[in-house]
């Protein structure tokens, strides 16, 4: 501590500011890149609850909900209070749970069920926000099978082009987001699509699922092999931001024209998305083990968290951060910690047997 104080004092004496947790991109205050690697453990999953993926929150009481992506094993929806205490869990069966969304109108938690991975069909379900182990799980809608999008042609610097042909037809509903009118948008990672359910609070079960976009930019031939993933709406509700995990991109969908464009590039494993009160778009970079914030131009303006190793079979910091949710001035992140390479001994995720939810402070500026 003394050496750190001496260093800061020395820097002050030579008129160079010493900043805690901040790296300056240049001398302009408006261009500072905020970096804070501190990560707290909010909760540790127990029992057979493994591979936490989706996350959402109850804005009325601060409860945090987490779903598991546990292959063909029993998958659960967990409810924690604001202090990380497990309040309830509900068994959803062997089909993995991916995305979660909280319906402020009906006060229910919506869940994407990837039945096509285990027992079809893939669908959307929901459960009361105050659920316990005996609460009824309700069907909302079945995801339609529309197949892979058309091929994508990619230009090269030398003027040539490459053509990507997509083949996967599995229905993989992933993330969800509600708009201010209570309509639900859903990403499909394998079919390369964005779906919409109008007013699901009033139509379930058997809600109609409309196709908003079926675009080759929403599919991927990259790694991890998930295309359209995390979703977030702009403050004016005119733009839907979409993470494409395998392409390391964040896309933007104009909800009026239905045009899909690239918003940001080179975010390693772009996954969960969320916007804060200041209009920043936060992205879980699941292969970089960090969370980054983008400004209105798609430029990275802040970075939070990092992976610091394994202790007691649990990750220290972030490891494969998949989904995130913002509550007040804190951001909560699921550490999926899922090995993907198929080669023994090359991923720290292989050493994890205790799975965690992380919590970090949002920067004030």
Image (tube, rainbow, N blue to C red):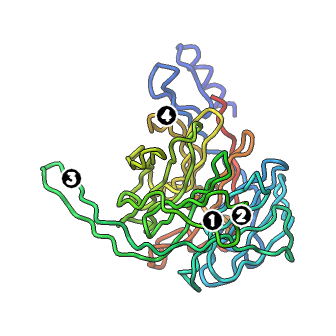
Question: What residue is disc 2 on?
Answer: 66
Question: What residue is disc 3 on?
Answer: 155
Q: Quadrant of the N terminus?
A: top right
Q: Is residue 25 left or right of residue 104?
A: left
Say few, some or many: other residues with alpha carbon within 10 Å of mark 4 (under 14 / 14 to 19 / 20 or more).
few
Q: Quadrant of the C terminus?
A: top right
Mark 3 or mark 2, earlier in chain: 2
**Front-lying residue, 90 or 37:** 90
Mark 4 or mark 1, earlier in chain: 1
Q: Is residue 314 left or right of residue 128?
A: left
Look at the numbered disc 1 and give the secondary structure of its residue.
Answer: strand
| Nearer the camera: disc 3 or disc 1 | 3
Residue 10 drawn above or below residue 91: above
Query: Mark 1 and mark 2 in contact (Cβ < 8 Å)?
Result: yes
**Image coords of residue 111 (percent x, y):** 67, 67
Between the C-alphas of marks 3 and 1, the distance is 34 Å
| Nearer the camera: disc 3 or disc 2 | 3
Disc number for residue 96 = none
Between the C-alphas of marks 4 and 1, the distance is 27 Å
Query: Mark 4 and mark 2 in contact (Cβ < 8 Å)?
Result: no
Question: What residue is disc 4 on?
Answer: 296
Question: What residue is disc 1 on?
Answer: 53
Seen at 50% across and 70% down, the residue is 347
């Amino acid at each position: 501590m003394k050496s750190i104080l001496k260093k800061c004092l020395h820097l002050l004496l030579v008129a160079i500011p010493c900043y805690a947790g901040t790296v300056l991109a240049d001398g302009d205050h408006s261009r500072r890149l905020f970096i804070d690697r501190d990560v707290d453990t909010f909760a540790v999953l127990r029992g057979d609850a493994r591979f936490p993926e989706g996350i959402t929150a109850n804005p009325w009481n601060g409860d945090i909900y987490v779903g598991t992506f546990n292959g063909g094993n029993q998958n659960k929806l967990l409810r924690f209070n604001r202090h990380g205490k497990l309040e309830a869990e509900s068994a959803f069966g062997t089909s993995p749970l991916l995305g979660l969304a909280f319906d402020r109108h009906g006060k229910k938690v919506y869940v994407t069920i990837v039945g096509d991975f285990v027992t079809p069909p893939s669908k959307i379900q929901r459960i009361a926000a105050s659920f316990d182990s005996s609460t009824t799980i309700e069907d909302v809608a079945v995801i339609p099978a529309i197949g892979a999008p058309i091929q994508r042609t990619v230009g090269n610097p030398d003027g040539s082009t490459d053509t990507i042909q997509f083949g996967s037809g599995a229905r993989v509903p992933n993330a969800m987001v509600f708009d201010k009118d209570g309509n639900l948008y859903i990403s499909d990672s394998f079919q390369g699509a964005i779906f919409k359910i109008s007013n699901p609070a009033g139509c379930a079960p058997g809600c109609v699922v409309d196709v908003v976009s079926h675009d080759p930019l929403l599919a991927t031939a990259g790694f991890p092999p998930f295309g359209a993933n995390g979703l977030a709406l702009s403050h004016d509700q005119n733009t839907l931001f979409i993470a494409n995990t395998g392409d390391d991109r964040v896309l933007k969908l104009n909800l009026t024209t239905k045009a899909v464009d690239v918003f940001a590039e080179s975010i390693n494993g772009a996954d969960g998305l969320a916007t804060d009160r200041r209009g920043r778009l936060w992205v879980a970079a699941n292969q970089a083990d960090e969370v980054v914030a983008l400004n209105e131009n798609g430029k990275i303006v802040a970075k939070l968290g990092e992976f610091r190793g394994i202790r007691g079979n649990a990750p220290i910091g972030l490891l494969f951060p998949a989904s995130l949710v913002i509550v007040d001035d804190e951001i909560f992140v699921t550490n999926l910690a899922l090995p993907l390479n198929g080669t023994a001994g090359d991923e720290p995720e292989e050493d994890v047997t205790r799975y965690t939810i992380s919590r970090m402070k949002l920067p004030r500026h």
